[in-house]
Each structure stands twice: as C-alpha cells, then as structure tokens.
C-alpha cells in the first residue's frame, strides 16, 4: 500500500493541539521540547492557532492552553443528530433516581466519547469527564452499542487490534468481546466491573435513532463497593438505565 503524503505544517499543528489536550498549560519552550521543534516554528504555529481560536494565551504567565473550539465542533456533530437536547431531561431524571453519576456517550470508530454528564451528589463518585475518549470494548457504554452492530462491523473495528489492558478485568481480545456482547444482547444492557478503572463499575444501555441504529448510550457509574454486582440495587439500576435509553430512543423516533 502506497504511503500517504502528510502536510507537515498541519501535522505539527495537530501534534501541538493533542499535546495541549493532555497538559493544562505549557509555554513555547515546553511545547517545543515535547514535539521536538524549534521555538521559532512552534511560535508561528501557536500564533496561527491562537488567531483561529483553537488556543489561547494566559496573559498572566504567557502559557498556552486549548480553547473549547474543538469540543464545540464535536458537540455540533452530536447535536445535529438531536441527541443532546433530547437526552438531557432523561439524564437528569435518572441522576435524581440513582444519586449516582450519569453519562451520555457516542461511538467514534472503535472508541466512545463522553458528550454529557451529570455528577453524583455523593462525596465519593465516578468522574471520567466530558470529552474523554476510551476504547468501546473497555466500557459498558461502548459494549451496549457494539452489541447492536453486525459481525462484519465488529471485525472491521477490531480485527488484528491489540486490546489494551486498562485493568486485569479488561476484555483481552475480539473473541472474548464477542462472547460478552452476546450476553449484552440477551440482557438488554451492558456492565463494566472495573474493566476501565479499578474501583469503578457501570451499567449502560444503547440509544437508537428512528432507523433503529445505535447512535449513543447512557450509563450509570458508581464506586464498585457501593453497588455490588449481584445486589438488588444493581438490578434496579440496570432496569432504570434501560428505561432511560428507551425513552430517549423514542424521542429520536425509534419504534420497536
């Protein structure tokens, strides 16, 4: 396969944006060292990104950080599907019913991206953050969506991939994932017991659009010690998250 030529200046700008997404604030020298570019080149790229609104400079310390422009662009894609506005009241109701953290996520390739969240009112709570992206196979949100995809789509997403082990409980390969997804389809919801973060558990259900296509998922996230896997409270949460996903799906035009 022929190597695709890259535009060097764009590639460098994206390296800087991705660096600043991991680091809260950096100066020109720090950026240059991290992306292995001289200060003059970094300064020109950063100034261009500032003018275009992707980066801002803190006048008090001359440090640079990303703005919300990229998030706004991503949120705009989600919002065009009418998911955010339709889902929000249902997320709020679910958060009140459970007192735990409620998340909304969409799938992006083989990853899920958190697009909305309502924090738990408890002192100890789950918090992965809006805008964060993780492999779908390591989360209940992702698995609830993957369970509704066809075999060919799963193969396209993960065949040959190395599954990163976030914890000792993370699914190890595609065959193991397929077995889990079969159980998800049978139950109607997905679980994640410390597969992404040690001490964190979740239950999730997929949201469908008017064509029946899985376009998002809603989850309840909580410390594992607080809601045990086989407890009545876990069963109640699984039922509530399915009801919420179904209600949002109906708002999007889905009819069973």
Image (spheres, grey):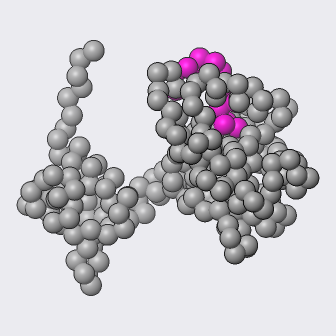
Q: Quadrant of residue 60?
A: bottom left
The residue depicted at 53 percent of the width and 45 percent of the height is 166
Answer with the quarter of the image where residue 190 lies.
Answer: top right
Q: Is residue 39 left or right of residue 211?
A: left
Front-most of residues 101 and 232 = 232
Q: What residue appears at the point 70 percent right and 47 percent down from the top-left corner?
A: 193
Residue 26 higher or lower than 70, as above or below? below
Q: Is residue 73 left or right of residue 211?
A: left
User: Which of the image's four quarters has the N terminus?
Assistant: top left
Residue 25 placement (x, y as % from top left): 32, 69
Q: Nearer the viewer, residue 187 or 94?
A: 187
Question: What range is drawn magenta here?
Answer: 143-157
Query: Which residue corresponds to the image point at 68% horizontal and 70% vertical from the top-left?
Result: 124
Residue 93 visible to an observer of this rendering:
no
Residue 38 image offset from top left, x and y in percent:
9, 57
Question: Does the segment drawn in magenta span residue 154?
Answer: yes
């Amino acid at each position: 396969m022929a190597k695709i030529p890259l535009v060097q200046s764009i590639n460098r700008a994206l390296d800087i944006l991705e660096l600043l997404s991991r680091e809260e604030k950096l100066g020109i020298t720090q950026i240059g060292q991290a992306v292995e570019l001289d200060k003059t080149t970094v300064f020109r790229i950063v100034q261009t990104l500032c003018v275009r609104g992707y980066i801002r400079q803190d006048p008090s310390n001359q440090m640079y950080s990303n703005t919300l422009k990229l998030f706004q662009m991503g949120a705009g894609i989600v919002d065009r599907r009418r998911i955010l506005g339709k889902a929000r009241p249902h997320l709020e109701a679910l958060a009140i019913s459970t007192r735990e953290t409620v998340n909304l996520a969409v799938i992006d390739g083989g990853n899920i991206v958190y697009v909305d969240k309502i924090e738990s009112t408890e002192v100890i709570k789950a918090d992965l953050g809006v805008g964060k992206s993780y492999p779908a196979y390591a989360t209940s949100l992702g698995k609830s969506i993957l369970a509704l995809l066809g075999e060919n789509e799963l193969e396209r997403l993960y065949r040959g991939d190395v599954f990163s082990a976030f914890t000792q409980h993370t699914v190890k390969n595609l065959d193991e994932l397929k077995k889990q997804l079969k159980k998800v389809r049978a139950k109607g919801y997905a679980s994640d017991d410390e597969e992404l973060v040690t001490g964190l558990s979740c239950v999730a259900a997929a949201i469908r659009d008017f064509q029946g296509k899985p376009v998002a998922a809603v989850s309840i996230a909580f410390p594992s010690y607080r809601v045990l896997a086989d407890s009545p409270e876990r069963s109640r949460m699984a039922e509530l998250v399915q009801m919420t996903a179904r209600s949002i799906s109906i708002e999007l035009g889905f009819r069973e």
